Amino acid sequence: MALLIAVNEKRKAVVLGGAMGSSYASEVELLRRILARKSALSSLPLVGDRVYDSIDILDQIQKFGAQPAVRIKTTWRYSIRDQLRQISHRGWEEWGSQRYRIGRVFGAIKIKVNSVFPLFREDLAMKRALATAALYNLDRLALLTLISIKIHLIICFLFMPPTSTFSHTFRTLPLLPFALYNISCYFFYLCFDYF
């Protein structure tokens, strides 16, 4: 599974696209499938691993309006000759340290639902993984929309578990109940602000 994830300045992540493949599918081909369905990207840097350093991907990222920040291999014997790769290398030096924010999304998904889906059929496991990413996205979009309205009012409810005891942390909640809990908690405040 490959996901294209956007992170805003408040460190909140939203999934922009996803593609599924077999166990040993090429990550480059998965990214090409994601980008083929896009018409534009925001002008933010697109941070990626060294595997995405092909010229056609960097060119497509730049055509969509994003700044490529893909790690490029350099050694004392090998220098970067292509201009797109030089731009990408400079972007990596500036933005590569923010890569952990993207890894946090995968960690959050794996904590909320098990990282291994006990299903016999591979196609069902792929559909479940995409549904998990979509549910994560619904939760994040609801949260981002509502946090921008009353940040101090909503932050205090952000990490509260639905139980009365504090021993049950929010990370152990399954993804769907966690998303529904966030949406139900903030819906009252959203309506209260508008009416």
Image (spheres, rainbow, N blue to C red):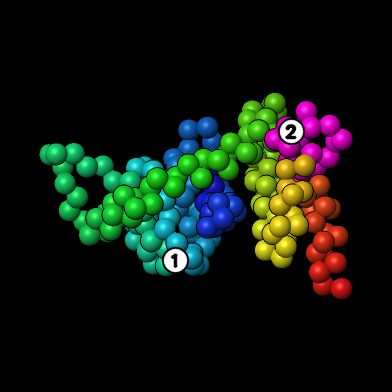
Tell me the kind of residue under disc 1.
Ser
Single out the residue that lies furthest toward the left.
77
User: Which residue corresponds to the image point at 59% horizontal and 52% vertical from the top-left?
Assistant: 12
Tell me the kind of residue under disc 2.
Thr
Task: Please tell me whether residue 182 is drawn above or below residue 164 in the rendered image.
Answer: below
Q: In this view, does 164 lie to the left or right of 28?
A: right
User: Which residue corresponds to the image point at 28% horizontal and 51% vertical from the top-left?
Assistant: 89
| Residue, disc 2 | 169
What is the C-alpha distance between the residues marked 2 and 1?
36 Å
Nearest the eye: 144 or 26 = 144
| Residue, disc 1 | 43
Q: Is residue 98 left or right of residue 4?
A: left
Q: Position of residue 111 (x, y in %)?
A: 65, 33
Residue 190 placement: quadrant = bottom right
**Mark 2 residue element:** loop
User: Which residue corresponds to the image point at 29% horizontal and 46% vertical from the top-left?
Assistant: 72
- Residue contact at pointers 2 and 1, CB within 8 angstroms: no
Nearest the eye: 152 or 11 = 152
Q: Give the range drawn in magenta.
A: 161-178
